[in-house]
Image: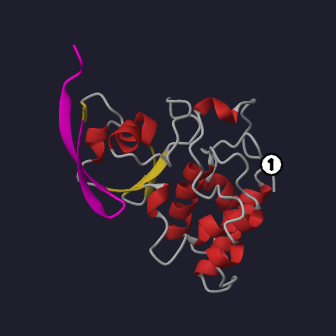
C-alpha cells in the first residue's frame, strides 16, 4: 500500500506553495520531488555534508533531516530563490568569477550558508566565513576560492566590489546553481575546510 499523501503548505522563495507528499517526507524531498526545486542536493541524508542546506527564516537548515511539517509557517529560501529578477545574487556571480564551483554538487548548500552569513555580518572575517561554511563539505576544492568568492560578494553587497554581474561573468561555468548531478557524482573522500 502506498504511503498516505498529506497536503503541506510552504512559503518557498517568496511564493506560497501547496503540495501533496507522503507524511514522512523531509523538507528536501518535498522541495526536490514535490515542488521540482532540484537546486538543493541530496547527499548524505544524515545532515553531515551540507549539500541540502536551505534557509528557513534566514537560518541555514539541513533540509535532509528536517521533517517537512516543521517548515510550515516559515519562510524557506532555496538556491533558486537567491537570485532576483534583475540577475544572480552577488554570491552566485562571485562563485562564477572566482571559479569557486568545481563539480557544483556542494555549491547550492554553500551559497545558502554564505547568504545567511552575509545577512547577519556584512563584513565577515576569513575566520567567520570558515566557521559559517564549516558544515558544508566540498570534495573538489581547498576552499580558498570559495572563501575568496564570499568575501568578494560581501564587498560587492557593501558597494565596494565590482558592479558587473552575470553579463560580466558571461555565465562561464554554468554551475552557479549547482547543476543537477547524481549524489554519487561528488565521489572521493570528504575533507573538511582547509586553511586560508
Q: Residues within 10 Å of mark 1 (few under 14, many from 20)?
A: some
The picture places residue 13, in percent across and down from the top left corner, at 37, 61
Q: Which residue is mark 1?
A: 142
- Quadrant where the C terminus lies? bottom right
Residue placed furthest toward the top: 1
In the rendered image, the vertical position of residue 163 relative to residue 30, given as above or below: below
The picture places residue 153, in percent across and down from the top left corner, at 64, 72
Q: Is residue 9 magenta?
A: yes
| Residue at 61 percent of width and 65 percent of height | 92
| Residue at 55 percent of width and 55 percent of height | 113
Q: Is residue 143 visible?
A: yes
The picture places residue 18, in percent across and down from the top left corner, at 22, 49
- Quadrant where the N terminus lies? top left
In the rendered image, the vertical position of residue 79 relative to residue 92, given as above or below: above
The picture places residue 37, in percent across and down from the top left corner, at 42, 48
Q: Is residue 97 magenta?
A: no
Magenta residues, as a range? 1-20
Residue 32, located in which quarter of the rendered image?
top left
Q: How many marks?
A: 1
Q: Secondary structure at mark 1?
A: loop
Amino acid at each position: 500500500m502506498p504511503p498516505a499523501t498529506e497536503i503541506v503548505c510552504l512559503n518557498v522563495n517568496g511564493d506560497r506553495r501547496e503540495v501533496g507528499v507522503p507524511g514522512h517526507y523531509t523538507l528536501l524531498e518535498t522541495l526536490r520531488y514535490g515542488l521540482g526545486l532540484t537546486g538543493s542536493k541530496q547527499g548524505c541524508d544524515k545532515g553531515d555534508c551540507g549539500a541540502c542546506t536551505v534557509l528557513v527564516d534566514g537560518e541555514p537548515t539541513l533540509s535532509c533531516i528536517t521533517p517537512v511539517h516543521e517548515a510550515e509557517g516559515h519562510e524557506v529560501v532555496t538556491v533558486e530563490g537567491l537570485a532576483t529578477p534583475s540577475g544572480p545574487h552577488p554570491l552566485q556571480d562571485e562563485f562564477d568569477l572566482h571559479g569557486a564551483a568545481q563539480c557544483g554538487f556542494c555549491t547550492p548548500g554553500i551559497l545558502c550558508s554564505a547568504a545567511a552569513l552575509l545577512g547577519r555580518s556584512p563584513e565577515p572575517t576569513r575566520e567567520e566565513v570558515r566557521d559559517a561554511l564549516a558544515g558544508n563539505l566540498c570534495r573538489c576544492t581547498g576552499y580558498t576560492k570559495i572563501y575568496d568568492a564570499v568575501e568578494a560578494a560581501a564587498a560587492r553587497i557593501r558597494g565596494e566590489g565590482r558592479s558587473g554581474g552575470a553579463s560580466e561573468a558571461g555565465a562561464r561555468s554554468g554551475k552557479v546553481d549547482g547543476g543537477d548531478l547524481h549524489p554519487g557524482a561528488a565521489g572521493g573522500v570528504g575533507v573538511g575546510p582547509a586553511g586560508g
